[in-house]
Amino acid sequence: MVAGFFNKSPSKAAASKGVSVTVSQGSKVLKQIDSDAPVNLRKLLLDNKVDLYKPLDKLKQCGGGGTCGTCRVRVTEGMENCSKKGLGEEKMLKAVGADIRLACCTRVTGPVSVTVKP
Ligand code: FES
């Protein structure tokens, strides 16, 4: 008899390598989104129907080009699991806190918590 032959559930170690994004707005946790692979934060949020943009920003957002600044999120946990800021993002967000990121310019590789519409 082969132990575990029919066990198809992933091990805890394999499961822990995935991406997990906890999304809040204000003090309210909206949802947790999991992904098996590193992913663009804006795409993950929009694919999971997170309302990322403030009402007027929906009209002027650049579609993920990194030029409008309307997709800002606050990373409250797991900044080490986010890609580093590029020069354009760094320049655009210079006047705000270091915990603010452009979702469209952020690749997530592990567990993070973000607040939308900070
Ligand atoms: S959508 Fe315009 S900067 Fe991210």
Image (spheres, rainbow, N blue to C red):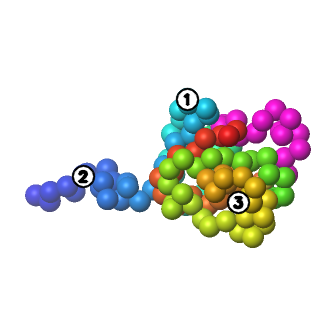
**Which residue is label 3 attached to?**
105
Looking at the figure, which quarter contains the N terminus? bottom left
Q: Earlier in the sequence, mark 3 or mark 2?
A: 2
For badge 2, the amino acid type reads Phe
Label 3 C-beta lies within 8 Å of the nearest ligand 1 atom: yes
Is residue 72 a member of the stretch shown in magenta? no
Look at the picture and state if 30 lies above or below 33: above
Q: Residues within 10 Å of mark 3 (few under 14, many from 20)?
A: many
Residue at image x 31%, y 50%? 9
Note whether residue 92 is visible: yes
CA distance for labels 3 and 2: 41 Å
For badge 1, the amino acid type reads Lys
Residue 52 location, quadrant = top right
Is residue 60 a member of the stretch shown in magenta? yes
**Which residue is label 2 attached to?**
6
Looking at the figure, which quarter contains the C terminus? top right
Residue at image x 52%, y 42%? 22
CA distance for labels 2 and 1: 40 Å
The outermost residue toward the left is 1
- On the picture, is 36 further left or further right than 106? left
* Disc number placed over residue 28 in the picture, else none: 1
